[in-house]
Image (spheres, helix red, strand yellow):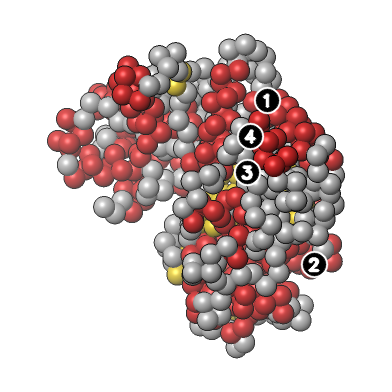
Amino acid sequence: MSTDAQAQSLEWLVGGSEETARRSGVRAFCRFTGIQIMKVQQTRPNILEATDRISSASSFLTSLLLGSIAPLSESDAASMSLWNMTEHRWDPLVLNCVMGKDSSLSGMSNEAKKLVQKLGEPYFDNSVALGSIASYFVRRYGFSADCQIVGFLGHHQATFLSQPLKPRDVMICLGDCDSDSVLLPLSHYLPDSTRQILPSPVKSPSNPSSNMPFMALLEYKDADLARHFLRDSYCNGSWHTFDTLVTLISEGGTIGLDDKLYTFFWPHGELGSWQGISRFEAGQRIKEFKDQRVNPRSLLESQFLTMRLQLSRISQGLRHLENTNEYLAPAYSLLGFNPYDHSVLPKRIVAIGQASGSRVMIDLLSSIIGVPVYQSVALSPTTYSTVFLGNQLAITPAALGSCYKAAWTYLRQFNLNQSYEDFLGERNIQRSKRLRSSDTRNTSAPIILTSLTRLDTSEASAQSAQPDQRGTAGFSSTNAASPIWNQDASSPELSNEPAIPIVSILTDSKDVEDGLVKVAEPDEDSFQRYGGQVEEFARLEKCIRRGVL
């Protein structure tokens, strides 16, 4: 059921999208639990009255294994648009609005208090188990009665934990559930209506040493569907043709300096009143480009420029919080930062997702944002893509992150001072040393990297059993030594192999110890030229959000 009216109403009652984001870490999107509750309260209040407990999907699965109702985690609570991020409690103002009560009330209404009882009080320590597995699973499936249950995670939170991200590291998921998303750790609470801020899923009061207590999520709904749409519309359904057009077309769609082309594709209109696909040439909105071949490159450039713009704003905001006297940008700048400055952008990008197997996309992403792009040893495009072929040994970032969190929680019983970052860092160092000791570096082979779906002992035996299969950057492969898109020609997705396969390049030992392999280096000249487009791009995006164009 549509909740557009409820989302708009809640933002208006709270004080606008920015105030909503300041309180709850995110603006009121239609899919959030708080908005859905508001809809039920308005249309079918008897159902809400008869409800005893409200759970998230992750806490519900935890409850099934525990055999009793599991509490929400703080991260789950923050995902509902009902949690006050600064006060660490359910927000009385938002709850009153959701339950249809006067927003001017100083405290929590009786109806809001009843809703809090249905939601329960969340737990704040993510480093402890919630209890033992239910006796049913012990009898029915043979689980050990001592098996401990750790709180389940949401998709993005679990993905965030699949790779140890350091300050100024960014994880970009391309083609993840038809959308793109950007995940990064934050040292400070930095709310804005264009992003979602969540507590770190491994935040623990007993381990205050972590200097990254928050994570930021930038989500671009149906971004991958937009690429598929243009592939089918302009490239005869061929990714090979798509990559070729992106490679042949000049930066910005033209060789001129002031007549660059931009494409915006927002099918759901979540950023404002406008929705659909819109093209701009020389600052004017047009129905179609004169040269239709520029469509694929224009779309990719606009998608990555959006990421560059928002990442720069986050970085500049953090710098301003840490040093309020720091020079920000020229007074005449609409951006608030210098678009040619590398210091307002990340140092490393970790690319995951099905679409990260495109060499053309990865190279373009690297040049637009101006930083090297890496891929995880455990989550290479080959390993990730096999999920869509039904390979039961494949692993997803969310599954890997969940396993890591469970292992860390178990080990914390013996070492209370070990942070999640230290746990993952030590594991990657040990693993890279073991694999490097038995492999040689090959910098020209396609990336076919080891899957972490097996235990370390199994990996070691697989290496000795298959010495002729080599991966890149000194890692063995347990897969066939050919790109994933050649394994099943009957698959419509795999029949259109990319024009240029991804190959690894020389990777620094520090990056290898972090479980990463470098796959793209930025072109500095391209980065500076794209810097000249950022301000015009930001102007057009702002106008579209407001429905001006």
Q: Residue at x 82, y 53 (%)?
A: 442
- Which of the two labelled residues, at mark 1 and mark 2, occupies the earlier sequence position? 1
Q: In terms of image quadrants, where is residue 274?
A: bottom left
- Which of the two labelled residues, at mark 4 and mark 3, occupies the earlier sequence position? 3
User: Disc 3, disc 1: CB below 8 Å?
Assistant: no
How far is the residue under mark 3 from the one under mark 2?
34 Å
Q: In terms of image quadrants, where is residue 101?
A: top left
Dot 1: element: helix
* Disc sitting over residue 451 in the figure: 3
Q: Residue at x 17, y 36 (%)?
A: 47
Residue that protrudes farthest toward the bottom in the picture: 290
- Which of the two labelled residues, at mark 2 and mark 4, occupies the earlier sequence position? 4
How far is the residue under mark 4 from the one under mark 1?
21 Å
According to the picture, the residue beneath numbered tag 4 turns out to be 458
Q: Residue at x 22, y 39 (%)?
A: 41
Dot 4: element: helix
- Which of the two labelled residues, at mark 4 and mark 1, occupies the earlier sequence position? 1
Q: Considering depth in this image, is 47 or 396 the residue closer to the camera?
A: 396
Give, as a three-letter code, the residue at label 3: Ser
How far is the residue under mark 4 from the one under mark 3?
11 Å
